[in-house]
Every structure is written in structure tokens, then in C-alpha cells.
Amino acid sequence: MIAQKLSAEQLETFEKIQRAAGQFRSRDVSSEDEKQKQPTQAEILLSIADDKLIIFHDQQREPFCSLQNKTYPLKTSRVKDILSYEYYKKTGKAPNSDALTQTISTLKGKALFEAPTIKLHNRVAFHEFAIWYDMADGSATKIMANHWEQTEAFPILFRNYSHQKKQALPEKDGNLWEVFDFLNVENKNQLLVAVYIVSCFIPDIPHPIFHPHGAQGSGKTTFCRVLKALIDPSGLSTLIMQRDYAQLIQAIAHHHFVPFDNLSDLPGWASDILAIACTGGGLSKRQLYTDEDDIVLSVRRCIGINAINLLIQRADLMDRAILLHLDRIEPSRRKDETQFWLEFEQKKAGILGGIFNTLSRAMAIYPKVKLQYLPRMADFAKWGYAIGEALKRGGGDDFLKSYADNISKQNEEIILSNTLIIAILKEMNEKTLWEGTIKTVYERLVEIAAPDKHDPTFPKTERKLRTHLERAKTTLAQQGIHFTIGERTAQGIPITFKRTDFPEDTKIRSFDTFASSNTQEQGGVDADNVDNEANEANFHNSGNQNVLDFTGETIEVVS
């Protein structure tokens, strides 16, 4: 009985052990299942991204995300910061770096291969018959014909950069002309400057290079800082000219209005980049030195350069420019900097509202504008007419006259800064025909000009004369001088210069006037003050065109 009893007890104990073991096994299996069912950190992060972020790629196929009307490249640390914080809010813990890296890599792939292409713009964009202006605070200004409004409901349009500052809230009853309380501009040039400022809010058109220049104390830097604050507020109120190709391209790409401050010279390669950037074109750079593929940046920017002397010498950049000479500010008109910027900030919202009022009226006028003659910057001239009319009745014609005078001034400046052109004009001053060979013509031009060996505007050898002449061809033609170069003969390569009548739309001062102006400049008289009113280019509107103004009435434009 004892043995049997022990056996029964043993059996009961054994059964208890088995049952306990079974429960443990069941718990272990359940625990393993639960672990398998729990999402990983990367999965949680991807779920957060799906809920919070809109992913896409831009026109350069760079992956982006959008959150609360702000866009961020997925490669930036800002996106990791956003995901880490949202993960912490959801779990109370911090994600590890491997999970974040896996999440970003997955999002990049989805953005490139599953998400749509969205074209991104810098500060201003044209979309659905309206101009949109990025306020850089999650809101935008929508400008339409005869109306503008603030909104937080807008499509993905803009790329945001860390240097950008939010814009002041514009006032509906603002006054654009109050900007000249803060700019050192003569009355005769104020309309041209006002038109340029408003035009900087128009996307997808070429804008002239804006080039204020003048002596120390003329307010050049302040000029650029005021325009930057109105057009494209940034932590960088002005920029320095980068001496590296890639860095210059990056600076241009990251700003809508790009004001280069206090330049002492403008290298040829930089001049070429600025010419492309202001009219629109592709600029390429590599993301990293190890990359084989180039990143092509298609940009069209508003660019300003200020300097003591006129820096632009190349004709291709000069005819894309607006030149503005600034006189030294009289001591009685000066303000201390603190008071100046305090007053500007107080009036900034009103000035900005005045800009939007003008632009909205110009958008109603623009479709009806037809000009008989268009200069190199044709889109700017056409919009300029509409903006001028929006500013005041008859302002369109006043703008065209002012812009024509400025273009005439550009041609003069090209000549005055080019030793070769001056020498040719001097030789052809009383001639209608000049024949010779490349060799004999070059020797005669050297005799006339006595050029400095470091002068970049005069060919160093006769072999380079042809290249320099091709660059000067347009400017010479505007002075009624044309040349032809023939095939090589036993005597050399023949070249013939002929003087023809001045074309009416390019006629400017004679060589005698240039020589006089150059002499005055060397003697200390500023050539910018030479009276130029008689030398207007032939800007005229086509006859009897009807232009719709902001009141809904029509303006008859008479040639």
C-alpha cells in the first residue's frame, strides 16, 4: 500500500510537473509570437512618415517630403529630426540610428519610384493663372488680376532653405512709393527702379542684372539690403562674389534675389554665369567630388551687383543690365543705421502691400499690351509697360523712355570701356570705307590706341583680332559700322570696314561726344552725368492698341 501510495503521489507530482511544463512552453510560444507581431522601429517610423509626410521628387529627381506647407529634401538631417520627435511622442523612446537610416532609404526609394514629380520654385511661382509668393511661414500670397490674398491652403510649390526669413504681412492700403524714403535714387530714375522691384515678383521671365554703382557713401549696400528685405528676406542680406564655380552656382540657386555686394572686379567666367542665370539656363555641378553624374540646375534669378565703378564690360552681360549711378549722400540727409532700419521695418508691410497692389493691376493690363519694338529683355519690357501703367496713367510710356535711355547708356558704357572699339570709331570718324589686311589694320589700331599690355579689351596679337571683332560686332553695328573678313590671299587676310547710316532704334552719340565724355571722365567729371535725353531708342507702342487698366476701363495707346 505504501509503495502504491508513493507511486500514486509520484504520479500526481509527475503530472503536475508536466502540466507546469506545458504552461511554460505555452507562455514561451506566446511570448515569441508576440515578439514576432510587434513592429520594428523602422516599421513604426515608416508608419509615422505615411501619416505625417507627403513624399515626392522634384524636377531634378531629388527626393523630397512636405510637412505643414514646408518642403525638405529627404537627405537632410531636418527630416530625421522630425521623424525622431514623432517617434518619441508615440512610444516615449528614441529610435536608434540604424532604424532612421533604413527609414530614410526606404522613403527615398518610394519618392523616386512611386511618388509623383512636383516642380519646385524659389520664393515665387506661377500656378493656375496666379502668381504665388512664399511668405516662408507656412503661408503664401496669391496674386491674381486686380486681387491678391493671403492663404495657408496652397499646393506644393516652393523649396525652402534654412537662410530664408518669413516675410512681413502686407497691408492692403500700402504705398509702393514709400520705398524711396530708403533708397538713394534721383526722381528721374524712380519709375525705372519701382518697375524693376515689382518685376522681381514675376516668375519665369528674364530679369535684367541690376547694377547700382557710385562713390563711397552713396548707399549702394543699403540699396541692395532694402531690395533683399522686400523681395526675398534672408539671414544673408547681401552676398559676396564666390571665387569658386560650384559655390557661385549654389549661391545663385539658393536665393531668388541675389545681391552681390561691394565687388571690385567681375571675372569673365563669373560674368558668363550671371548672364545665364538672369535670363534662364542650365548650370551643372557635382553633388560630391566622387559623383560621376552632374546635377543640372535650371535657374532664372533676379541678380544685383553693386560696386564703386561700373564693373560690367562684356557686351553680352551689359545688354542684360540696368545701370544706376548713385550720388554720394549729403551729410544732412544721413540717418544712423538703427533708426533707418527701425523706420524701414515700420513701413515695410505697407510697401509690400503696395507692390502686390501694383502687380495685381499689372496682371490685368499685361494681356492687352503690344509693343512695336522690343529690346533684348523683351519680356521685362512688356511687363514693365504694364507695371508702369499700373503705377500711374501714362506710366507705361514713361517706363519705356527711361528704359530706352538706360539701354542707350549701356551702349555708351560698352564703348567707353573697350579700347578696341574706341580705336575703330576714331579711325572711322570721318571715313565711310577702310580697307586693309588683318595685319595692317591691327598695326594701325595699335598705333591709335597704344593699349596697355594688360588691357583685356584689346587683342594681344593680330591673330586674336578677329575674335575681338566678333565680340564687338553688335556694338559697332549700332554705331553704323560693319566689317567683312575675306579669304586669305598672298597679301594676307583682307578686312573691310564700312560706315552706313545709323539705325533709328540704336542711334546714340557720335564718337566726338564719346571722346569728350571720356576726357571729362579722366578729368574728374562723372560721365554718368552727361545729358543723354536726345538719344532715345525708338520704343513705341503700336498704334491704337486698347489696354485694359485696373479700373476696367480701356486706355488708348497711341504711337
Image (tube, rainbow, N blue to C red):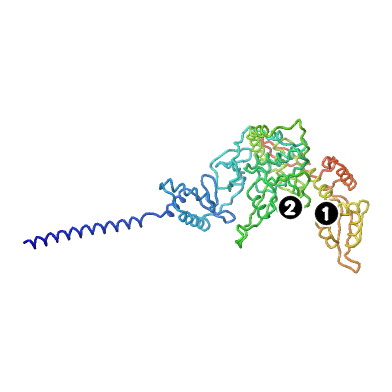
Disc 1 versus disc 2: nearer the observer = 1
Give how far across and how far down residue 238 sits, in percent: 67, 44
- Circle 2: residue type: Ser
The residue at 75%/42% (across/down) is 212
Q: What is the spatial separation of the Cα atoms under label 1 and label 2, in whole angstroms?
A: 17 Å
Task: Tell which of 453 and 255 is nearer to you.
Answer: 453
Q: What residue did someone put label 2 on?
A: 271
Q: Against 298, is 130 above or below? A: above
Q: Residue at x 91, y 51 (%)?
A: 429
Taking depth in this image into account, of 3 and 484 the one nearest to the observer is 3
User: In terms of image quadrants, where is residue 193?
Assistant: top right
Total tally of numbered discs in the picture: 2
Residue 57 picture quarter = bottom right
Q: Residues within 10 Å of mark 1 (few under 14, many from 20)?
A: few
- Residue 542 visible to an observer of this rendering: no
Q: Nearer the viewer, residue 425 or 130?
A: 425
Q: Amino acid at mark 1?
A: Asp
User: Farthest left residue?
Assistant: 1
Q: Is residue 225 left or right of residue 60?
A: right
Mark 2 surroundings: few (<14), some (14-19) or many (≥20) residues within 10 A = some
Q: Quick one: quadrant of the C terminus?
A: top right
Disc 2 secondary structure class: helix
Q: Where residue 124 sits in the image (x, y, percent)?
A: 62, 45
**Which residue is farthest right?**
430
Q: Is residue 519 left or right of residue 97?
A: right
Observer able to see residue 119: yes
Q: Which residue is mark 1?
A: 455
